[in-house]
Image (cartoon, rainbow, N blue to C red):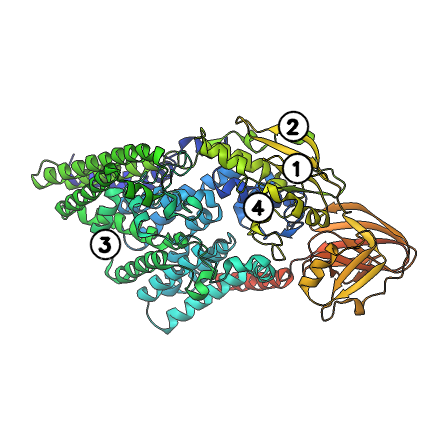
Amino acid sequence: MSAGASRERESRLCRFLPLLLVAVALLPNPAAALPLSSYYFGELSSVFFPLRLLSARELAAGRLALWNPFVNEGSFQLPALYPADLLQALWPSPVFVSWLLTLHLPLAALAAYWLARELGASRPAGFLAGAVYALSGFSLSCLNHYVLLQALALAPFVGGLLRRAALYGGRSVPAAAAALCLTLSTQAAPFVLQAVLLGLALGLVASPGREAARRLAGALALGVGLAGVSVLATASVLVEAASAAEFAPQGAIRQPLQPVVLAQTLLPGVFGTPQGGAGFWGGRFFGGGLPEFLSLYLGPLTLALAAVGALSLPRGPRLPLVALLALGLGYALVAHGRLGSLAAVFRSAGESLLLPQLVLSLSAGFAVERLRTGRSFRLLASLAAAAATIAVAIAVVLSSASPGLVAWTGVAEPLWPRVVDLTRREAGVVVLLALAVGAAAFAVERGMLKPGRAVALVTGLAVVDLARAGAGLNPQVHASFFEPLPEMAALRLDQLDGARVFSYGTLRSPAFREYLDRGAEAPTLTSAFVERQLGPHAGVLDGVELAEASPALALVPRPPELAEGLFHPAKVGELLPWLRNAGVARVLSLDPLSHPALVPLTAVPTGPPGLAIHVYGFEAWPRASVACRATAVAGREPSLRAPYRLGFDPWREVALEEQQGEGPDDALPATCTKGRVRRSAGTPGEERYEVETNASAYMVVRASHARGWRARVDGVPTPVLRANGKHRAIAVPAGRRDVMLHYEAPGLVAGAAFSLVSLIAAALLFVTSPRRR
């Protein structure tokens, strides 16, 4: 075969690289390619899946979920408008949710491949860039953060299409706007911001000047407008949410990235594995003892390739790409909660690593261009050898096992041998990879191996190494994992006539901590399973309304009321008045509780010996009542304290907070002597009551008050007042009345109008712009 025919055949084969890339992106867990099992690790099962399941169920019923009645006496529900989330209405199950999420890994690989090609890379170079981007430890770790993986998969498209918009204008502008709108609908703000920064940098470098700046501004404005529903509804919620303190500069960065954590980029198991026991992660380096991102692994070959490829990046975007890498990494390393308004976007320092990951992936891909010419193989081998030296040095230091070192890492001493063993094995892998690269470089220099084949060998080794390190990072289980225990289901906690359940959860449970300290088998799976039964979002899965379960729970319309110390089982007596006011009729705890007001009902074994869910009955205040006596109270705190004062009658009395335009002076006086109320219907975001009273009164609903709640009494709009500092009150006149409560997210209507206008503008721009050749 002639050299020309060989090159033509090779070119034809390269056209199938994107298809191969799809399969490569699934290598860490090939079984996930089919919708058969479900992920369960981290925030995916404890937060994101329950909330998305609520949205899917409501969408299947023809409603847009904007209110979550199952958490904290009622909380905000952000609109789930991302297309993959909308598809979940077809099959609201953890298996389908997991499968749709898995598909974002091949999407991420194809997106990075496309961006590399946009910047001038060959197909093989784009293949390596896409493989590294999808298989890196950071990308795989984003899976259990749900929205972060969705935005990560779309970020290269946003950057590349914004570059096109700056270069060509015309139809490229609405195309970039559509990509930005899609990414904004994931609600992963830190990744959206980084994608926009990438696009602006690439666009202004490719086409400097005012015209390009105007095109970019137009694309950004149009993209935000298209996402108006999601953007304005979300913004209005975040403004009102009491948890906004979590996004404030002083508290936003929960887990600053310590430099020692970067050792993970070279040795994936240097801090253990997710399947390890308690303390196996070197808790000194991570907030809460666990890392925000399970792995940052890139591997010695990828790091060496990225260093070589930095020399081959196109001259125009080279400097801004390296600057963006330094910006993201620098922010992660120095972010300690004092970086102003940026901290309102980045809740953990590791979230700023998207840009470094993407730039390193592109650089690794462009190394192919340099190596295919036969250049820089010796440099690549030297860099791989340096990586091997560092890995061996780390293994030697850990093997010394000095008492000071063990104490410094925060790893439990009995688990130290496992840390050392795992680090030694990973260092051995690094050495073998370095030897393989050195052998390939030697063969190329001696003419024993063609550069193209050597590049294919190195690419294959890098891909296999990344897939090997990522295997098991996101384990899966049968969908029955998300079902309640049969004994818990038999309690029918979802049918308490409006009363709520309070759960102590797992994080503060002495019994659960003791279980972990005993050296539990499969602690990750067990912890996730128990958390599924007792966690703050478990009620969403089972249709059970929960009272406050976490002082830092996000998106609640009021500040948390319970101090951390009150969650200790020994303080249950101090907690009871609050439970009554929250309408709690059942209490769940992994620890036995002792108080005369609590009636033991059953103890449900969770599986591990000595670990059971203790269920108690409790006399709750009514979910809804008629108040014949209203007291005006100035300020939120006095109003919150009113139900706890001596002599307060929850069946007849209410404290109304005085506020401009919505206080008791603007409503009917309460003059009744008797009355009753019955809840006749209820869905998330809508409730209906039948009220009967002999004179004017207030209907009090023990559920969270928020600005978006509207009421109609016999069809007449009536203000919803804040009762007892956190609940709802509606003035009702004498007689038999029908009261309808409905939640409408502030900003939703305006957002829909913005989206519609922007859609029309984008369509007109697309139709009237000439097609670019």
Q: What is the three-letter code of the residue carrying label 2?
A: Glu
Using the numbered discs, state the Cα–Cα distance from disc 1 to disc 2 in whole angstroms: 22 Å
Give the label, 1 or 2, closer to the camera: 1
Q: What is the three-letter code of the residue carrying label 3?
A: Ala
Left or right position of 115 against 757: left
Coordinates of residue 417 in the picture (x, y in percent): 30, 32
Residue 385 falls in image quadrant: top left
Q: Quadrant of the C terminus?
A: bottom left
Cβ–Cβ under 8 Å for marks 4 and 1: no
Q: Earlier in the sequence, mark 4 or mark 1?
A: 4
Query: Pointer 4: what residue?
Result: 86
State the SS at label 2: helix
Which of the numbered marks, if any, corresponds to residue 487? 2
Cβ–Cβ under 8 Å for marks 3 and 1: no
Left or right position of 274 against 77: left
Using the numbered discs, state the Cα–Cα distance from disc 3 to disc 2 in whole angstroms: 59 Å
Query: Pointer 1: what residue?
Result: 594
- Within 10 Å of the Cα at label 1, are there few (<14), some (14-19), or many (20+) other Cα atoms? some
